[in-house]
Image (cartoon, helix red, strand yellow):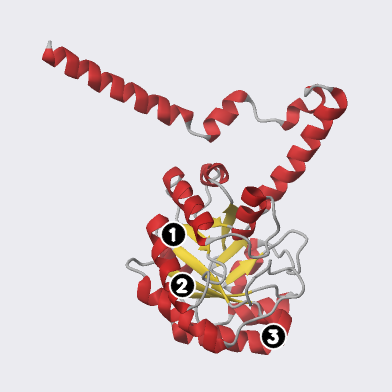
Amino acid sequence: MTLREIIARRQAVLAPGAANALFARIIEDQGFECVYVTGAGIANMTLGAPDIGLTTLDDIAQTVSRIADAVSLPLIVDADTGFGNAVNTWRTMKVLERAGACAIQLEDQVFPKRCGHFNGKGVVPLSDMLPKIKAAADARTKDTLIIARTDALAVEGMDAALERAEAFIEAGADMTFVEAPRDAGQMRRIAALGVPQVANIVHGGKTPALPQSELANMGFGIVLYANAALQAAVRASSEVLASLKATGSLNAVHDRLASFDERQAAVAKGKWDALEQRFKGELATQCISLS
């Protein structure tokens, strides 16, 4: 099923975030329908830095390419502010589409952007954002979706955020994403916009963690859990390593670790073993035919 078909159902399809190919493989193995390639996660895991606009287009594209090689799920890619003006955004679409993106998310924050649940955000004028959406639409050569995000709710209020989203739709956005609503009433107003909407559930963030069923009833197309896997990994790795440091062994936390076999299954080692055997078999057949 294509990403366009998935979002058209407006069933609040869950899109867990992956900052690397391993997380994306786990997401696919768990039966999810799509993957969100998280810019914040890439900043956190690749740079060891917060989501404050430090990543580059090359950082994102390299990660997208690796994830696209590892899984067959459609990829929604966080493209931040397009990495510049409309011309830069045109190139961003080209680069990320070629890397394997099925959708790119563009946002209207002032550069350097920051996590949507941080304070101190600013938004650019519509006259700067709308050309980026048009440039992305012009650059795409496939059915790559444009998700236009606004952070105006925190800066200018709910009505202004909805007005921006409407303008994004008119400019050619396939989905819109009003970031960081504070309550269910605001979320219902967002879901009523004319194209499918994104809800972003951040553990510990500003948006209420409503269940999928309620978000589906509202009509959201996609629900992001952008860094659930990352947050789980940070907690688990900290606790396991703290125990190793304190006790000198993993005995006290052995039940917190994937087994050796589970680890190999997570990276599809069986597939690579079968590939190796196939090539060995083909080579043996070739050698026999030449003898």
Residue under the image location 44 percent in, 51 percent down = 65
Camera-nearest label, 2 or 1: 2
Q: Nearer the viewer, residue 254 or 14?
A: 254
Q: Amino acid at mark 1?
A: Ala
Q: Earlier in the sequence, mark 2 or mark 1?
A: 2
Vertical placement of 74 versus 131: above or below? above
Asked if disc 2 and disc 1 are in contact, CB closer than 8 Å, the reply is no
Tally the marks: 3
Residue under the image location 67 percent in, 53 percent down = 44
Q: Earlier in the sequence, mark 3 or mark 1?
A: 1
Name, please, the residue furthest toward the right.
246
Q: Amino acid at mark 2?
A: Asn
Marks 2/1: CA–CA distance: 17 Å
**Helix or strand or loop: what does disc 2 sit on?**
helix
* 183 sits left or right of 147 in the view: right
* 18 sits left or right of 58 in the view: right
* x, y percent for residue 100: 41, 56
Residue placed under numbered mark 3 in the picture:
158
Q: Amino acid at mark 3?
A: Met
Can residue 187 be spotted in the picture?
Answer: yes
Can residue 157 be spotted in the picture?
Answer: no
Circle 1 Cα neighbour tier, 10 Å, few/some/many (<14 / 14–19 / ≥20):
many
* x, y percent for residue 270: 45, 27
Residue placed under numbered mark 2 in the picture:
88
Q: Quadrant of residue 81?
A: bottom right
Circle 2 Cα neighbour tier, 10 Å, few/some/many (<14 / 14–19 / ≥20):
some
Vertical placement of 145 versus 86: above or below? above
Disc on res. 101:
1
Q: Quadrant of residue 247?
A: top right
**Helix or strand or loop: what does disc 3 sit on?**
helix
* x, y percent for residue 7: 48, 67
